[in-house]
Amino acid sequence: MTNPHTALDLSAITAKEWADPADFPEDEFARATEFYEAMRTHDDRLLKARAEASGLIEQWTGRVPRDVGSFGTRLNLETSDLDLGIGFPVEQRDELMQVLMGEGRATFLGERKTSFSTTRLVFSFEVAGIEIDLSALTELDFAVACRMLDQIADEMTQPERIAHTWVKHLLRASGRLEEYAAWKLVTYARYCPEFNWVPIPEKTGF
C-alpha cells in the first residue's frame, strides 16, 4: 500500500466519524473533487449492472430491490460492488433460501444483525463481472432503510459526499483497512443510529 500525501489528520476525522468539508484546505478539497468526479466515470457501467441485477432479483423474489450501498449514496470508489436490499417476510426465509440457492442463483454469505432484535440474510451473485450483494431485511427494517436512504439523498450535501469519498480513498490507499471498513459505515450510523450495519466477514460494505 502507498501512503498518499494529505494535509488531513485522518485519525482525527475517523474519530469524529464525519468529514467536514470546511476542515479541508482549499487545494486538498480541489484534489478530492477531482477524484470524486473521476469516480463518476464508472456510473454508466454500474447503473447497467444494477438494472440487470434488480430485474433478476424482482424476477426471483417478487420484490423490488433498493440500492443500499455506496453506489446508491454516491460514495463509491472505482472497485465498488453493488449492495441491494429487499424487504421479505421472516417466516418465508426458508423459501427464499431455496429460491436463491436451489437453482444456484446466489451464494449465501450469512445472517447478520441489523438492529438489536432483527437480522438480515445476505446473498451474493455476479452480473457483468460485478459482485452483487443482496440483503433480505425484515419488511419493517427495509422500510426504515429506505427512509434513511431518502434522508441521505436529501440532506447529505455534494461537498460532504466529496469529502467522505476522499477520506475513504485515503484510508484504503494508505493500508488503514480497519479504519476504511469502519468509515464505509459512518454515513449509515449518522442517519440511522438504531441500525447495526455489521459487514459480512471479509466484506466492508452493507
Image (tube, helix red, strand yellow):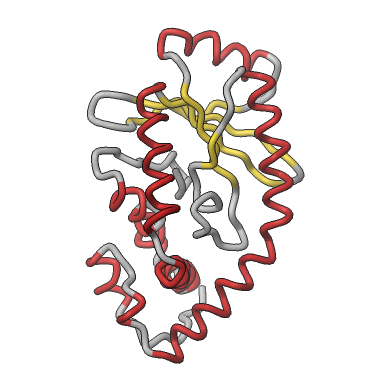
Whether residue 69 sits left or right of residue 50 in the image: it is left
| Front-most of residues 104 and 145 | 145
Whether residue 187 sits left or right of residue 52 in the image: it is left
Is residue 49 shown above or below 136? below
Give the residue displayed 62% in from the left and 14% down from the top: 99
Give the residue displayed 65% in from the left and 33% down from the top: 54
Whether residue 30 sits left or right of residue 10 in the image: it is right
Q: Position of residue 81 (x, y in %)?
A: 60, 49
Residue reaching furthest to the front? 154
| Front-most of residues 147 and 161 | 147
| Location of residue 89 (image quadrant) | top left
Is residue 82 shown above or below 15? above
Q: Position of residue 97 (x, y in %)?
A: 55, 15
Give the residue displayed 68% in from the left and 49% down from the top: 47
Is residue 196 shown above or below 87? below
| Location of residue 39 (image quadrant) | bottom right
Residue reaching furthest to the right? 128
| Front-most of residues 28 and 133 | 28
Is residue 160 shown above or below 189? below
Q: Position of residue 192 (x, y in %)?
A: 29, 44
| Front-most of residues 84 and 154 | 154
Q: Position of residue 91 (x, y in %)?
A: 42, 8
